[in-house]
Every structure is written in structure tokens, then in C-alpha cells.
């Protein structure tokens, strides 16, 4: 029987999905980032999130995947929930393979276990960049009174606006990502993935993005 220290790592996305896709689909809300990232890589190629080749990993026990991660230039290391021993084992594997975390994101307990293990093994100073919250939308209610203006799906004539706003947002949240915002905008426009709000004068004043539906 495999132990918590048995991590399987590699750069092959198809092999990773053959092992992990059912596991990721089993809890699509919790695993939303990994599902979205791997879907983008599968559709746009492994350089969709930056020039470096992504790294994928799964942890199996009793023949079943227990945990998984994806590491890309844009997102760093994105992990599913890990126990403290599993986090320590992953850090040990990264250190022995000469790999870098490139930043970590996931649930708070897993991230804290990983960064503490990394700090102890490498004596690296770990700095929290930001905290995020995952919301699960329930019943939607229209505002009353409704604001002046209207919503519309962004089209290709809005590309420059989307690129500019995405760049400004990245700067505002302190993200150092060097992602290709033109490619980001084009990928969203291809499936109608950005909605704009126009004020009463017809000027776009806000945008909201949505990823393709995956695993329900």
C-alpha cells in the first residue's frame, strides 16, 4: 500500500488528468482553481500561464488519489487540502528534486503547513501576499431599485478595454504576474466570458468574468 510520502510528479498534463480528473471532479467547488487552470492549459497549451512548463502532482493511497497540485508561472503551487505530514512529504520531494514552490495557494491550513515546512527545510523567509475567500452563490435577487444602465456581453471591439482593466486590476492587488493580458482577453471573448456594465450614457464602467463551466 502506498504511503503519504508517495507523490507522483511530472510535466505531462494528460497523464496527470488520467490520474486526478475524477478526484478533482468529485468536489468541483473546492477544486475550482485546479479545474479552471488545467482546463485552460488543455485548451490553450502548456504555455497559457507563462513560458515555464507547468508541474503536476498527485498523492495516492490504496490506489486512490488523495491530493493533487498544479504549479504554473501565473498561479504558483495550487494545492488541494493536505494533512501536515503530506505537506512535509511534498516539500521534501520538492527540495530533493531541486524544485521551487513559486508561491503557494490553497486552503489556509494546507498553505500554512507547506510554507512552514519549506521555511524549516530552506530557511527561506515566507511572506503572505494576500487572503482570498471562496463564495458559493445561492439564490440571486435582482436589486430594487435597479441601477441605471445595463449589462451586456463583451465583444471583440472591447478587447483593448479588457486588457487595460485586467492590467490595472493586477497592479491594484499587488500581483507581479507577467501574464499575457491580450491572450487572456481573447480567450474570454471567444466564449463570451466577460460581462460589462454600461452606465446610463452607454459607457462601460465595470466588468465581471466567468470561467467555462466544468464538472457542474
Image (cartoon, grey):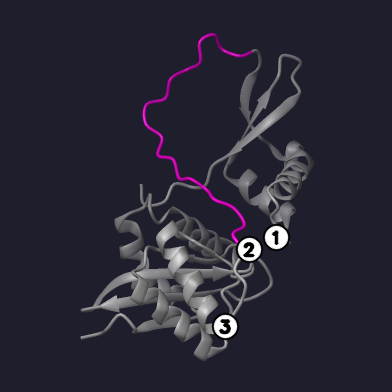
Closer to the observer: label 2 or label 3?
3
Among numbered discs 1 and 2, the one appearing first in the sequence: 2
Q: Please state which of residues 107 and 147 is positioned toward the viewer in this rendering.
A: 107
Residue at image location 43% in from the left, 76% down from the top: 57
Determine if residue 79 is in view: no
Q: Which mark is residue 74?
A: 2
The residue shown at (61%, 24%) is 151
Helix, strand or loop for the magenta stretch, by majority: loop
Q: Position of residue 67 (x, y in %)?
A: 35, 69
Mark closest to the chain's N terminus, 1 or 3: 3
Q: What residue is pinned by disc 1?
A: 177
Q: Is residue 54 above or below residue 155?
A: below
Residue 135 seen in this snapshot: yes
- Residue located 75% across and 49% down the image: 171
Q: Residue at x 77, y 39 (%)?
A: 161
Crowding at dot 2, Cα within 10 Å, few <14 / some 14-19 / many 20+, comes out as many
Q: Secondary structure at mark 2?
A: loop
Towards the viewer: 129 or 14: 129
Residue 114 at x, y = what percent? Answer: 46, 71
CB atoms at circles 1 and 2 under 8 Å apart? yes
- Horizontal arrangement in the rendering, residue 177 relative to residue 64 (left or right): right
| Gap between marks 2 and 3 measured at Cα | 23 Å
Residue identifier under label 3: 122
Residue count near mark 1 (Cα–Cα under 10 Å), binned few <14, some 14–19, many ≥20: some
Position of 189 relative to 76 (above/below) = above
Find numbered disc 3 in the image and state the secondary structure of the residue it sits on: helix
Callout 1: helix, strand or loop?
loop
- Marks 2 and 3, the one that precedes in the sequence: 2
| Residue 5 percent across, percent down from the top left | 34, 83
> Residue 200, percent across and down?
71, 14
> Magenta part of the protein: which range?
127-147
Alpha carbon of mark 1 to alpha carbon of mark 2: how far?
6 Å
Amino acid at each position: 500500500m502506498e504511503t503519504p510520502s508517495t507523490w507522483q510528479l511530472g510535466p505531462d498534463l494528460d497523464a496527470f488528468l488520467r490520474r486526478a480528473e475524477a478526484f478533482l471532479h468529485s468536489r468541483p467547488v473546492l477544486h475550482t482553481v485546479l479545474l479552471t487552470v488545467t482546463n485552460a492549459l488543455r485548451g490553450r497549451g502548456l504555455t497559457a500561464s507563462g513560458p515555464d512548463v507547468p508541474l503536476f502532482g498527485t498523492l495516492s493511497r490504496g490506489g486512490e488519489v488523495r491530493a493533487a497540485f498544479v504549479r504554473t508561472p501565473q498561479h504558483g503551487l495550487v494545492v488541494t487540502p493536505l494533512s501536515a505530514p503530506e505537506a512535509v512529504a511534498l516539500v521534501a520531494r520538492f527540495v530533493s528534486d531541486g524544485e521551487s514552490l513559486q508561491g503557494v495557494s490553497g486552503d489556509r491550513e494546507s498553505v500554512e503547513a507547506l510554507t512552514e515546512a519549506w521555511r524549516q527545510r530552506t530557511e527561506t523567509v515566507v511572506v503572505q501576499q494576500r487572503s482570498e475567500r471562496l463564495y458559493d452563490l445561492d439564490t440571486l435577487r435582482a436589486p430594487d431599485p435597479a441601477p441605471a444602465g445595463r449589462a451586456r456581453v463583451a465583444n471583440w471591439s472591447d478587447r483593448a478595454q479588457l486588457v487595460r482593466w485586467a492590467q490595472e486590476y493586477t497592479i491594484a492587488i499587488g500581483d507581479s504576474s507577467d501574464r499575457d493580458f491580450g491572450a487572456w482577453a481573447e480567450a474570454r471573448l471567444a466564449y463570451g466570458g466577460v460581462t460589462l456594465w454600461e452606465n446610463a450614457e452607454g459607457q462601460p464602467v465595470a466588468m465581471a468574468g466567468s470561467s467555462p463551466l466544468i464538472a457542474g
